[in-house]
Every structure is written in structure tokens, then in C-alpha cells.
Amino acid sequence: MGKSASFASPFPNEQGSVISIYGDIVDILDQLKVSLVVSTDALRLFCLGAEHGQLSATVIPFHNPFGVNVLGNRLVITSRRAIAIFNNAPHMAASYPADPNRYDAVFAPRAVYLTGNCRAHDIQISGESVIFANTQFSCIAHCNGTYSFSPLWQPSFISELMPEDRCHLNGFAFHNDRVVFATAFAPCDTPRGYRNLSTKSGVLMDVISGDIAVAGLTLPHSPRLFDEELFVCNSGFGDVLKIDIASRKADIVARLPGFTRGLRTHGDFLFVGLSNIRSTRREIPLLESKVPLLSGIAVIEKKTGKIRGWLELPDSVNEVLDFDLVPGFRQVLIQDTNEEGGGYCAVETPVNSFWTPIEGAFVGEG
């Protein structure tokens, strides 16, 4: 039987919620001194950290969050039609007026790129731009505020870029400042055509050569290169796979009790996002296995695949959409972009910083 941690909900008329804890995951977060920023289907972000063996959780309302990436002091979060950019001001964290001396990092919103309905999934900060899996237009794209997006790469089987989600291109591996691998549900070139094909039609694509590196995957997500080693989530099986780049041979690192999506590493560990299955899914081995599924974050040993533990998020969460690690910080706060009133806003200049109250709708004076 696992432990649990309670936290307050930011939503009106919703009681406090509970995160269930299994295994060593809290101790591992504590030892590594990292936090998690987790996007979910429940219109909220979870900021999870640990100190002195105790889990802490902060929940932030956020409209349709999906992809998450942290690089240094910058954080980006995608939604269906926008990419929000945040900057960390750690020197302001302890003085947050609503809860002084709790946080050691505070990410405040600094810009929003309006992409239109691109349904961005994986995302990566790259200089002054952000690169993202443009799922609706079946390509890898970048955005810097000039256009809705600029295409960088599309699979060879995609004949034209149309807002038709032809192959469900959803993830990519970024290495040495370039995209090197990408995942899609099927090599298909018709509007939402992947939905008419077997769920075992998933592909891992070599972006540099344009070839399909591995076929026959089941709803794959989150290809990642960690220390020159290639990993991918074979989501429909609940697997994390390790791919030999030379031979393209795939080996199972771990099989987990959930739809695997979201993959990060720190030290000797892999962190994996887990989700329940949407009711619209079909022919998925996870459903056929009858294994009870959970939504949360698991941690496994990178070399052995041993599952060291997991956090199970509250019942209000069915899916973990993505997450990233915030190294060096234990208690993270993200300020949402909501301006309906209440709370405080971080205002920072090159020489000073201030916490100012959010006063709600603007009322003119004369």
C-alpha cells in the first residue's frame, strides 16, 4: 500500500485532492533536487517537488496545456492554439506575497506566441525560437512570433501541409541543436487517415535521412536521445523502448501500468508519464491486458529498467500529456496568464522586481 500527499485545489467548489505515492520516487526527487512540471487533461498543471522526504504539490489552472519544455531559466508550455513562454525569477520566489518562504523558483509569463490551431505536442526551446511538433499540419515547425509557424521538416509521405492531422506526428528528439528523430501514428497522407489504420502502424522516423527507422510501433510518443542513446515510448503497450541507432533493433526497457507519453532523464533515472486510455482508442494491447491503469509519473533505472516508484495523480486527471524536470529547484510556482483577479503578478525590470496585485477587469478613469 502506498503513501499519499494532500494539497489544496485552486478550483472553486472542488475539495482538496490526493496524490498517491508508491516506491522510492519522492526520495529520488529529493536526492536529485529536481521538480516536475506536469501538464494534464484536467485543465491544470502540477508542480511536484520533494524536500526532507516529503512531497509537495502546487496546482495551476491552465487552458488546454500540452507540451512542456524547460531550458535554464526558460519554460514553454503549448496549448491548442498558442505557446506560452515563462522566465524564472528565483530571487523573487521567497517573497511571493500569498505564500512567503515556500517557493525557490517562480516562472512568470513573458510572451505568448499565437500559432492558431496547430495542436502543438512536443516542444523545444532553441535560441529565440521554439520548435514544436505541429500535429495538425503534420510537420516539425518553429515559431518566433513572425508567423503562426514556419515549417522545418515534414515526412516524405506528406504531400502538402494542410490542417488535417494526417499522420498524427506528435514527438521529436532534439540533439546538438537539431531535430533528429520523430514519431507518428502511421505513414498516412489523407485527412486523419491514421484513424482508419491499425494502431500498430506507428513509426519512428529518421529526420536527417528521411527514412522510417522503426515501423510497427503502437501509438508511439516522445522519442528522446539521452547520452547518445535513443529511447521512445511505445505507448499502446505501456513500454519504454531503447533503440539501437545502427541496427534499428528495439528492446523493452520497462513495461508500465499506463499509456506511456512524456520521457525525461536525470542522473541514472528515466521519468515516464503514464495515462489512462481514452474511450475512443481501439485495438490497444494495454486494454487487452486488463492491467489496472494509472495516471501519473513513474521513475525507472535507466540501465536496468527496474521500476523504482510512481506518483498517481488525483481521480480528476485521466491523462498526463507531457512534463519536464526543473533541476536545482524543489518548490516551483508557475504564474498562470489568467487576469480575472486575485493573486499577484511578478513585474521584473533589469534593475528591480515587484509583486503587484492582480486587480481583475480594467476600469478606465476618465
Image (cartoon, helix red, strand yellow):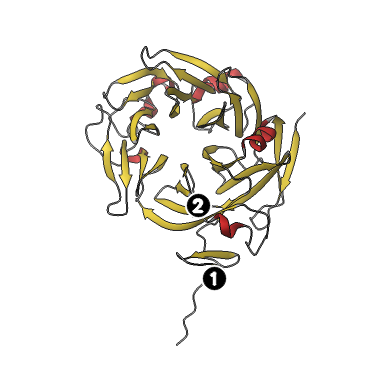
What's the residue at 58%, 65% (across, down)? 344
Q: Which residue is mark 1?
A: 360
Q: Secondary structure at mark 1?
A: loop
The amino acid on which the numbered mark 2 sits, given as a three-letter code, is: His
Quarter of the image with the C terminus in it: bottom left
Q: Secondary structure at mark 2?
A: loop
**Looking at the picture, does residue 224 appear above or below residue 63?**
above
From this viewpoint, which residue is outermost toward the left? 159
What's the residue at 61%, 30% (across, down)? 298
286 or 343: nearer the viewer: 343
Say if residue 291 shows up in the picture.
no
Residue 63: numbered disc: 2
Image-based side of 4 in relation to 280, left or right: right
Say if residue 42 shows up in the picture.
yes
From this viewpoint, which residue is outermost toward the bottom? 366
Position in image of residue 254 (x %, y %): 56, 19
Q: How many marks?
A: 2
